[in-house]
Every structure is written in structure tokens, then in C-alpha cells.
Image (cartoon, helix red, strand yellow):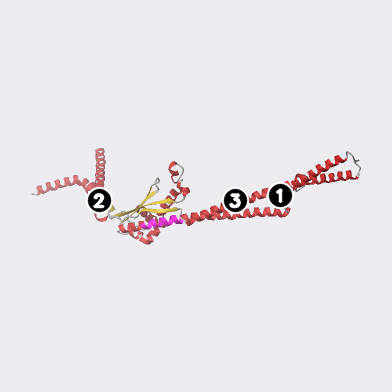
Amino acid sequence: MNGKRLSIHKFMASHLKGYGKQVMFLVIPFALFLVYLSFFAVEKYRSESIYVIRDLTTKQTLGVDLGIFGGGASSTQLDGVIVVNFLQSMDLFNRVDRWFKLKDRYCSSQTDILNRLIWKPTDEDYLRLYRKNLTIVPDELSGVTTIAFDSSDPELAQSILRYLLTAGEAFLNQLNHNTAEKKISFLSEQLAENKAKRELAVQSLEKFQNKHRLVDPSASLAAYHNIIAQIEMEIINKTAQYHQLLRYMSANTMEVTKLKNEIEEQESALEKMKNRLSGPEKQHLNDLLFEYQRLSADVEFAGEVYKNTLVQHDLNKMEALQESKVFEVIAVPTLPDGHVYPRRLRMTLTAAILILLGYKVMMLIWTVINDHKD
């Protein structure tokens, strides 16, 4: 009787020894996985939405797709990247936490045990888990962005996603407002500077006119030319009369001498008039005319620059009053009716395959070690 019991014990020990590795490397890991999947895994629901950032300015319509052909990213694409970074930022997470108490959820049983923050989590740990639950997939070609948020509560996931979309829209509007304010501020400075230049040019012209007592030197120049033409005509006529008198009168007679003196006086006056126009005098009319034309051109140029700056200022002011870029929600956040995690069947099959492969590798290593020992 004792011999039979001893043989049974030996048989069981040998079989247990043979199945010990399978129990250790197959049964126990798979059992632990099933326990986790059945009792500790927290179901996560995903709310999804789609939004796009549209540029309403006509000049941007021609340049939206330039980035596709290697021309660099458009301003709309850059704004999309900025909005995505804002949605993933610590600042927005803190605002979401104030409304929905995410930090408390991330430390409680409402979060899966594998992701639960237990041991004195830092702000970076909270942000990392928040970003893990937030999915943002932009499409660079169409400009459409898909956004989703995961939570153990389907209604909470939908509410948080709505809040994120509202915050993203407000952020883009503020970004547009700040950009418009910077443009208007710069153009206002340019407008004031160009206005001062225009006034300075006008003052220089007025100073020139008051100094030389000339409204328009070109009119004075035309008048001088008329006077010179008249004097020259009189000199020609009197010279003809003088030569005609010399035919029958002596050069010393009073009438001939008087006519000769008149001709000399007119020639002297003519010389002075010509010197006044372009001769060796310090301020002849030609110089005054050129200076006047230069000052008038400065006034005209400063006026054109000021007018163009004023038009640009008014246009940018009008753009500031309207939204140049719009955050448009194409698909509203969904209310999920099924969980996305855990996928029990898929995870079970995956775990079984991985555990079996791991067991085969361990057995191969075990065999190699035993062969080397022998």
C-alpha cells in the first residue's frame, strides 16, 4: 500500500515538474492578463469631431495651395499648427481641469490602472496623460483636422471636446485680433510719420515762397520772357530807325544822339533782364524755378505717400473689424455609444500569441543553456 502511494507521488511530481515551465510562462501570465481585462481595465469612449480653418481674404485664396508645390506653408497652415499646439498646451489643460476635474479622474478608479497616476504625479504627468487621450490628425492637403478625446464617461468626452473646439475658436479669433492690432499700430505710426513729412514739405515750400515773394516762379519766368521779347523788338525797331536817320542826318545831331542813347539804355536793360534769368547773379529765376519745382515735387510725393498709407490704414482697420480667418466646425462632437478600449477579443488573441511566442523563446533559451551544461 505504501509502495503504491509512493509511486503515485513520484508520477505526479514528475508530471508537475514537466508542466511547471508551462504553468509559469503560459498559464500564469495569461491568467493575470484575463484578470486585468475582466476586473481592472476601464472602458474608454471616444468623441470625435472635424474642423477646418478658412481664410476669407481674397489675397490668400490664391496662395492657400502654394505650400503643396514647395512654396512654403501658407498662413492658414501655420495658424492650424498654432491652434493644434494650443489645444495640447498646459494652459488649456489647466482650464479644462478647472471645469471637468481631470486631475481627480486621472488619479481615481475612473482611469485604467495601467495609466492611473498614483505616486505624487507632476503637472507634466497630467499633461502627458491628457495628450494621450487627445487625438489630433490634420490633413495638410485639404486643411481639414480630425480631433477626438477619450474618457471613461461618453458624455464627458463629448463635453470636453465641445469645450476644446470653443477654446480653439476663441484662440484663433484672438490671434486674428492681435495680428490686426499690430498691423494697425504699425500703419498708424507710418501714417503719422508720413503726415509729418507732408507737412514739413508744405512748410518748406511756403517758406520758399514767402522768402522770395513768389507764388510760382514759372509765372514770373514767363512774364520776364515776354518783357525780354518786347525789349528786343523795340531795340530792333529803334536800331532800324537809327540807321535810317544816319542816311540823311549827322551822327552828332540831337535826334540821332537821343535815339542812340535810348537803344543803349534798352540794351543795358535787356542785359540785366537776361542776367536776372540765368546770368551771374546769385538768385536768378532759373535757380528759383528749379528749387520751386523740387519743393513742389517733394510736396506731391509726400502727399501721395500719405494718401496711400491712409488707404492701407483704413483697409486694415476694416479687416480688423471682421474675422479674416474662421474656425469652422464641420462635424459636431459625437456622443459615443461604444467603447474603443479595451478591445477584449483582439487584445485576448494578441496576448495569447505574444505569451506563446514568449514561451517558445524561453524554452529555446532554456534548451540551449542545458545543452551547454551537458
Residue type, mark 2 in image: Arg
Q: Where is residue 133 in the image (x, y as percent from the top left)?
A: 34, 53
Residue 209 appears in view: yes
Q: How crowded is mark 3: few (under 14 residues within 10 Å), some or many (20 or more)?
A: some
Residue 271 sits above or below residue 128 on the image: above
Q: Residues within 10 Å of mark 1 (few under 14, many from 20)?
A: few
**Residue 169 magenta-drawn?**
yes
Which residue was labeled with disc 1? Answer: 219
Nearest-to-viewer mark from 1 and 3:
1
Magenta stretch in the rendered image? 162-174
Q: Residue at x 70, y 51 (%)?
A: 216
Q: Residues within 10 Å of mark 2 (few under 14, many from 20)?
A: few
Residue type, mark 1 in image: Ala
Residue type, mark 3 in image: Glu
Which is nearer the N-term, disc 3 or disc 2?
3
Total marks in image: 3
Give the CA distance from mark 1 to mark 3. 25 Å
Q: Is mark 1 on a helix, strand or loop?
A: helix
Which is nearer the N-term, disc 2 or disc 1?
1
Which is nearer the N-term, disc 1 or disc 3?
1
Q: Which of 330 and 85 is in front in this view?
A: 330
Q: Residue at x 62, y 55 (%)?
A: 196
Which residue was labeled with disc 2? Answer: 344
Which residue was labeled with disc 3? Answer: 304
Q: Which mark is residue 234?
A: none
